[in-house]
Amino acid sequence: SRLETCSMSTTEEEEHVNENSFVEDALSYLDQVKLQFGNQPQVYNDFLDIMKEFKSQSIDTPGVISRVSQLFKGHPDLIMGFNTFLPPGYKIEVQTNDLVNPLQPQALTPSSQSNPSIPAYTSPRSPPMQLHPPLSGTPTGPPMQNNQPVEFNHAINYVNKIKNRFQGQPDIYKAFLEILHTYQKEQRNAKEAGGNYTPALTEQEVYAQVARLFKNQEDLLSEFGQFLPDANSSVVNKKKPKLLNLKDSSVAEASKHGVGTESLFFEKVRKALRSAEAYDNFLRCLVIFNQEVISRAELVQLVLPFLGKFPELFNWFKNFLGYREMSHIEPYPKERATEGIAMEIDYASCKRLGSSYRALPKSYQQPRCTGRTPLCKEVLNDTWVSFPSWSEDSTFVSSKKTQYEEHIYRCEDERFELDVVLETNLATIRVLETVQRKLSRMSAEEQAKFRLDNTLGGSSEVIHRKAIQRIYGDKAPDIIDGLKKNPAASVPIVLKRLKTKEEEWREAQRGFNKIWREQNEKYYLKSLDHQGINFKQNDTKVLRSKSLLNEIESIYDERQEQASEENANPPTGPHLTLAYEDSQILEDAAALIIHHVKRQTSIQKEDKYKIKQIIYHFIPDMLFSQRGELSDVEEEEEEEEMDLEEGASKKHNGVPSSGSPSKSKLLFSNTAAQKLRDCDDAYNLFYVNNNWYIFLRLHQTLCSRLLRLYGQAERQIEEEVRERDWEREILELKKEKNDNPAIQLRLKEPMDIEVEDYYSAFLEMVRNLLDGNMEASQYEDSLREMFTIHAYIAFTMDKLIQSIVRQLQHIVSDEICIQVTDLYLAESASGASGGTMSTQSSRSSAEAIYQRKAEQLMSDENCFKVIFLRNRGQMQLMVELLDTEEENSDEPMEAELREHLAQKPVFLPRNLRRIRKYQKSREQLDKEACEGGKKSLEKEKMECMFKLNSYKMVYVFKSEDYMYRRTALLRAHQSHERVSTRLHKRFQAWVEAWVKEHVTRDMSAETNKWLMGEGHDGLLPCATTCQPEVLHFMNINKYRVKYGPPGKAP
C-alpha cells in the first residue's frame, strides 16, 4: 500500500531531519537490552561489540542480523525492536517457534515447498533462515477517497502523526509498522500466486488490529480508515448480529437504542464501572463490533477487563452475544506464553529456601506441559527456582571462562542442539509410523473418516509441530492441517520427507563429530589450565631485574617510613627470607644452567670456566651442599695450569695477563664456606651488588620450581601405584595404559612416557627448548599432558634459565662484580665471611670491617647483605638492603643543583655592610700576621654535601667550624673585673653566713693553729708563712709550709 511505502520513506527522512529522535530511540533500546540482561552483562557487551564491528565494516548487514538474532534468542521483543535501526529493505521476523526469518532486499522467489536442511554455517546450532522478497514494492493501485486519490504527502503526515503521538510508547509505533509489513507481504504473495493464494490477512483484519492498537485514539483510527476503503465497504456485504442495532459510530448514541432488559443491563454496567470514562470505553468496544471491525471472540476479550470482575454481567453479555467458550480454539497452542512473566516476579519478596532458592508465588501461571505423566507431576519441581544473590561488596570474584573453555562449551552446545533436532525428528517419525501402521489396518472408508488431533497421534502438541516446521518452514501450517484432515494421503509423504532429512542430518552429524573431536583434543587440556593463560605474561614481568630490585626497595622504604612515623630507629634484619627446601635439586638446576652456558658463543672460554666454578663450587659451598664435579678435560687443564710458573703475571682472580688460552686457577679452592659444609648450625656471609642479588633470586626461583615439579611427579607416581594395587587386589584387574577416561573419550592422545619418567622427560624437554629443537607450544602441551594443571609453573623455564646465564655473564666480566668476589675471598681468609652461630660474637668486628669495605666498594649502587643460614637441617637465604646513603653523600652535585645553590642570596643591607666590614678587618689582620712571620693556625672548616636522591644536606665527617658574636672578646675583657668581683663577693657572703651559723670561735682558733702548725703534739713540726697576692682582681693569701726535722721517739 501507499501508506506502507511512505512509512519507510518517512522513516528515512526523519533520520536526516531529526537525528535527536534517532539517538533517543537507540539509547532507549540499549537501556532495554541492559535491563533485560541485567544478570548477564556479557550479552550486553557482545551486542556492543557487534555494533562496533558493523561500524568498522567488519561485517555486513545480514551478518549483523544473524548475530543479533542468535544473541537475543528467546527475546522476540528485542529482536523486533532492532528492526528500527536496520537499513531500508531489511527486516527480522520472529515466528511462534522462536525461528528467525530475516528479510533482505534480494528478489528471491520462494519455492512452493520450502526445504531447509542443516544451515550452511559452521555451527549446526544456528537457526535456519530464509530469504524473502524486499519489503518495499510498487502499490497495486492508489486507494480512493470520494473518487479522489489519497495524496502521498497525506500518508507521510499520518505516519508522522502516529510517531509523535506515541513518542513515549515506541512499541506501539513499531507494532503499527509491523502490521503494515505483514499486510504488504500477504498482498505481494497473493499477486505472485496469480489468484491461487488467499491472503491470510485481509483489510478488515488489518483494521481490527490497528483498532486494538489505537484504542482511545478515535481521530487516528478514523483517518486510518481512509487508506482501507474495502474494510468499510465490506460491512454492507456481510451479515453479523448487531448488538442493540447500533449502526452509528457515535458513542453518545450507543445507549439510546437499548430497551427493556438491554437497557437494564447497560444501567447495571454504568453503575458497576463507576467511571464515565470506563463506561465510554466499554461502549466504544460495542461500536467497533457493530462496524464489523472485530469478531465476536475478540469483543469478549476486549470487554473482559471491564466486566471480568462482575461474573453475572459478563455471563449475561456472553449469552446475549451468543458466545460459546469452545467456539474459540486456537489452531495451535501458544508456546511459552508466560515467557516474560518470570522477569516481572519480585523474587526478593518470595518465600526463601536457603540462600539461592525462591518459591514462585501462588498467582504464577505454570506453562503448559502436555507430556507430563503422573510420576512427572509427583517428582518434578514446579515451585522452587534458583535465584543466586551476591553483594557488591563481596570479595569473591568469579573467574571468566577462558577462550579454550569457550571452545569446549560451544562444542557441547552445538552437539546438544543437533541432538535435540535429531531426537525431535526421530520422535515424529515414530509417531507417524505408528499412525501409518494403524491406517494400513483400516478400510478405505475408515481411512477417509480417520482424523488426527493436535498431537498428531502422539502425546505432545509442540514436539511434532516443531519437527514439521523445521522442515517445511512457512508451509508447516498447511502440512499440519493436511495431516489432521487427510492423514491417509499426507502421512506417507511427510514420513518419507522426515526420513530423508533424518539421513541427511545423521550424515551431517558424522561430519561434525570429526570436527568436534579435533577441537576437544586440541582444547581439552588447555581448558583445564586456568593459571597458564596469564602466567607467562605475568611471570615475565615478575622476573625482570627492575621488578626484583623494586620488590626489596619497596620493603626497605616501608620500614623507613614506619620508623620515621614512630620516631624510632629503623629496624635491622633481613628484608627477604627465601628457602632452599632440598639441596639435591641444586644438581638439576646446575645441569640446566651449564647446558645453556656451553651453547653460548658470546661467552669466552675463560668466562665459561668461571661460571662453572660458581655453579659447581661456590653456590653449593654457600648452601652447605656437596660440590659438583668438573669434567675430566677441565681437570686436566687445571693440573696443567697449576704447573705454570708462580712468578707469571696474573690479573685478578688468577686470569693470565697474557693472551694464553689456558684456564684460570680455581677461584674457590679453599674458602671458609667449604669447611662449614658439615656444620648444622652455621651461616655464610656475603655482601653483593645488584647483579649478584638478581642472580641469587633467580637461582632460588629456578630451584623452587624444579622442586615443585619433582614433587608433583612423585605424587603422581604414588597415585598410579596406589590405583594399580587397588585394582589388582580388590577388582582383580590389570589397568591398561590407555584406560584413562579422557583418552577413552578421545579428549586427549595417549602418552608414550611412563609416569616414572615424567621428571626426567621434563628436564630433557627443557634442554631441547633451550637448544631450539622444540617449539614452545609443543613443550607446553607435553607438560600439560604430564603434569595437568600443575604444569604452568614450568612454562617460562627457558626464559628463567636465560636470565640466570645473562646475570652470570655480568658476574664474571663486570669490574664491580669481580671486585665483590675478590673482596669475599680476601675476607674469607680472615674469617669475616661466616662461621658457626655459637662463635658469631668473636667475628663481629671482622664482619663490621667487611661491611664497611663492601659499602665503600659498592658506593655507586645498592649493597646487599646476604646470609646463607643452615639451622636444624633447614636452609634459608636472607637478604637485607643496606643503608649506604650517608657514605654516598660525597658524590658531586648535579649541575642543576649547583647552579641553584650558586645563585646570589638575598640579605638585609645593614647585615651585608657589617659582614663586609668584618671581612676587610679580618683580611687586614691576616695580612699583618703573614708579614710578621707569624704562622697562622689553619683549621678545617665545616663541610657539607647534598644527597643526589633526596637533595638533603649532610655534614662531612671530621670537619668543624665555630661561630661567635662580633666584639664579644673585647667586651669580655672589659667586663671581666666587674663580673669577677661580683661573683667573689657573692661567694664570700655565702661563706661568712655559713661560718657564722655552724663554726664557733674555738673551732676557728683550732683550725687557725692547725693551719699555722702551732700547738699540735705528735705531728711533724713545720712553719707556715702567709704571702698576700692579687689574682683576677681579688686579694688572696698564699700559704707556704716548711717542715722541720722529725723529733726523736720517746
Image (tube, rainbow, N blue to C red):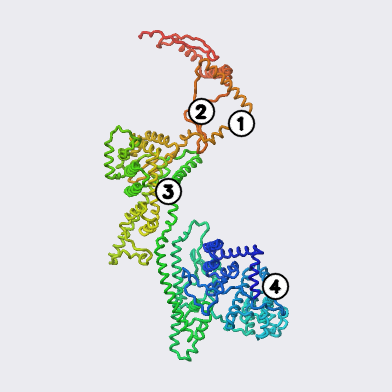
Foreground: disc 2 or disc 1 = 1
Q: Which amino acid, mark 4?
A: His
Residue 543 badge:
3
Q: Which amino acid, mark 3?
A: Leu
Query: What kind of element bears circle 2?
Result: loop
Whether the residues at callouts 3 and 1 have beta carbons within 8 Å, the answer is: no
Q: Which amino acid, mark 2?
A: Met
First along the sequence among labels 2 and 4: 4
Residue 518 in picture, x, y percent from top left: 40, 65
First along the sequence among labels 1 and 4: 4
Foreground: disc 2 or disc 4 = 4
First along the sequence among labels 3 and 1: 3
Q: Is residue 179 above or below residue 1031?
A: below
Query: What kind of element bears circle 3?
Result: loop
First along the sequence among labels 2 and 3: 3
Label 3 packing within 10 angstroms: few (<14), some (14-19), many (20+): some
Q: Is residue 473 above or below residue 945?
A: below
> Number of numbered discs present?
4
Whether the residues at callouts 1 and 4 have beta carbons within 8 Å, the answer is: no
Q: Which amino acid, mark 1?
A: Val
Residue 942 badge:
2
